Image (spheres, grey):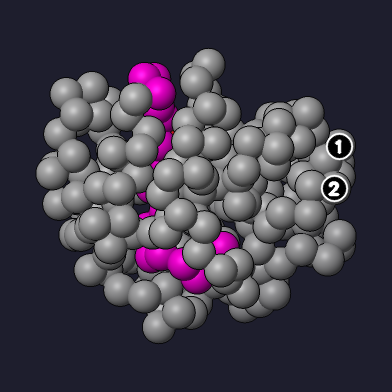
């Protein structure tokens, strides 16, 4: 795994949000993302092979930062840690989930979609979070509205973002990176079209360093 970055938000401009149904797809998919210039992946715990996929990528593709997404319970946070995940992402942020993710010692992005949820995360001393579901919750307008009154919060907006809209999010001062599944659509993964994943990753990587946007 790459050396731990100062922030999970500063590794790639676009965080690939990935669902793996077939364990055999995990390593070639991760390699295609790296080849395209995106050395990070959020592998969602939405399938029975997800933890094994995280372990396989962690073992066999050391140049990628592999995280676990769709963490819903403290138990899943621990399982993801034990499988080799380098960071955790959740769609929401209950007190028990925040405690469970923090207990792993891993960087994590708790999901928020209201000002009070963002403030609750800040109260615990964490400044980085996911904004989910981004498009359904107000999109760039919501994030712009928060930048001045709550400048400490930095976000990875995810949910409904596309190749066409990613740049408008990345231009905001409180956005480090955006997340999305458009790099690895189910049909592309199913047919093992790793060249297409690499092409999509390269286009996303070209959106620029999140550091230069931050
Ligand atoms: C997530 O878990 O962050 C979302 O499912 C990704 O959303 P998208 O599929 O709309 O990109």
Name which residue lies at 79% across and 33% down.
74
| Residue 39, quarter of the rendered image | bottom left
Q: Position of residue 153 (x, y in %)?
A: 66, 68
Left or right: 130 in relation to 25:
right
Q: Position of residue 23 (x, y in %)?
A: 40, 23
Question: Furthest residue to the bottom?
Answer: 212
Disc 2 to disc 1, C-alpha distance = 10 Å
* Mark number displayed over residue 132: none
Q: Secondary structure at mark 1?
A: helix
Which of the two residues, 183 or 93, is positioned nearer the viewer here? 183
When the figure is inspected, residue 162 is found, relative to residue 38, above or below; the finding is: above
Name which residue lies at 56% across and 69% down.
3
* Mark number displayed over residue 103: 2
Q: Position of residue 85 (x, y in %)?
A: 60, 45
Residue 213 within the magenta-colored segment of the rendering: no
Give the mark nearest the N terminus, 2 or 1: 1
Q: Secondary structure at mark 2?
A: helix
Look at the image and tell me whether residue 138 can be seen.
Answer: no
Q: Which residues are magenta?
A: 8-23
Q: Which residue is mark 1?
A: 96
Question: Furthest residue to the top?
Answer: 48
């Amino acid at each position: 795994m790459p050396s731990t970055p100062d922030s999970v938000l500063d590794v790639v401009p676009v965080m690939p949000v990935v669902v793996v149904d077939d364990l055999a797809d995990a390593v070639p998919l991760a390699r295609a993302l790296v080849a395209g210039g995106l050395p990070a992946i959020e592998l969602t715990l939405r399938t029975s092979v997800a933890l094994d996929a995280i372990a396989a990528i962690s073992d066999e593709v050391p140049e990628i930062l592999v995280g676990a997404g769709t963490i819903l319970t403290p138990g899943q946070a621990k399982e993801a840690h034990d499988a080799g995940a380098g960071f955790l992402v959740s769609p929401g942020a209950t007190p028990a989930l925040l405690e469970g993710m923090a207990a792993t010692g891993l960087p994590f992005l708790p999901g928020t979609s209201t000002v009070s949820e963002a403030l609750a995360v800040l109260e615990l001393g964490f400044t980085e979070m996911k904004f989910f579901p981004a498009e359904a919750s107000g999109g760039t307008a919501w994030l712009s509205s928060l930048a001045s009154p709550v400048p400490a919060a930095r976000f990875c907006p995810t949910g409904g973002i596309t190749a066409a809209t990613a740049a408008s999010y990345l231009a905001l001062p409180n956005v480090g990176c955006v997340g999305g599944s458009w790099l690895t659509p189910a049909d592309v993964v199913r047919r093992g079209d790793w060249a297409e994943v690499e092409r999509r990753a390269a286009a996303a990587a070209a959106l620029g360093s999140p550091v230069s946007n931050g």
